[in-house]
Every structure is written in C-alpha cells, then in structure tokens.
Amino acid sequence: MLSRAEEYRQRARDCEEAAEAASTVGMQSLFQVLREQWLDLANDVELLDRDRNKPSEPTDGDPKMDKESKLPGAKDSAAQF
C-alpha cells in the first residue's frame, strides 16, 4: 500500500506522461501545472506526517503549562467539579 506522499508522486508522474502525450501546448502546460501541484502536495503531506510522528516536547519548567492536561492554565480536573 502506498503512502499518501507516494500516491501523490505517482499522480505527478501520470501528469508528466499525459503532458508528453498531449496534442497541444496548452494541454501540456496544464498537465505540467498539475504535476507541480501534486509534487507540492506530496511534500506538504510528508511534512505534516513527520510533524505528527515527532515526539512532543516536555513542558517541565513552564509554569503556564499543566503537566497533566498540556493546556495553558489548566487546573486539577477533579477540583473543577
């Protein structure tokens, strides 16, 4: 199974092939623009996936962050009720 980035890169290759087979300069340009957009999307989704999988940074030493909830200014949840 392909990752989203790999799938988008495959679509970019498909657009490249379509551009080469296109009968008009306008269609070639259109497929090249689409190719670039697929590649940009592949790069963006890779960055998002990388950020999502990156371990979160500890909040030790930051008085604004509650260690339990990771929300600024959060109080003890039991005390709120």
Image (cartoon, helix red, strand yellow):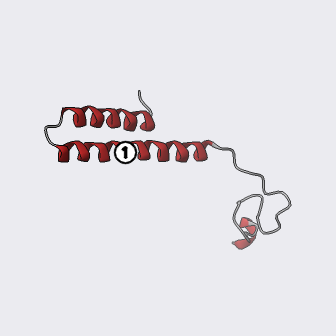
Q: What residue is shown at x 65% (from left), y 44% (from top)?
A: 54
The residue at the far right in this view is: 61
63 left or right of 72 in image: right
Q: Amino acid at mark 1?
A: Glu
Where is residue 10? Give x, y as percent: 35, 32
Q: Quadrant of the C terminus?
A: bottom right
Nearest the eye: 23 or 46: 23
Nearest the eye: 37 or 47: 37
Q: Please tell me how many numbered marks the rendered image carries.
A: 1
Where is residue 24? Give x, y as percent: 14, 42
Q: Quadrant of residue 28?
A: top left
27 left or right of 46 in image: left
The residue at the far left in this view is: 23
Nearest the eye: 58 or 33: 33
Counting other residues with Cα less than 10 Å from the Cα at mark 1, is it few (<14), some (14-19), or many (20 or more)? some
9 versus 71 height, above or below: above
5 versus 52 height, above or below: above
Q: What residue is shown at x 71% (from left), y 68% (from top)?
A: 72
Q: Quadrant of residue 53?
A: top right
Q: Give the residue pinned by disc 1.
A: 36
The residue at the far front in this view is: 25
75 left or right of 12 in image: right
Where is residue 80? Give x, y as percent: 71, 72
Nearest the eye: 4 or 71: 4
Q: Quadrant of the N terminus?
A: top left
Q: Secondary structure at mark 1?
A: helix
Q: What residue is shown at x 38% (from left), y 38% (from top)?
A: 8
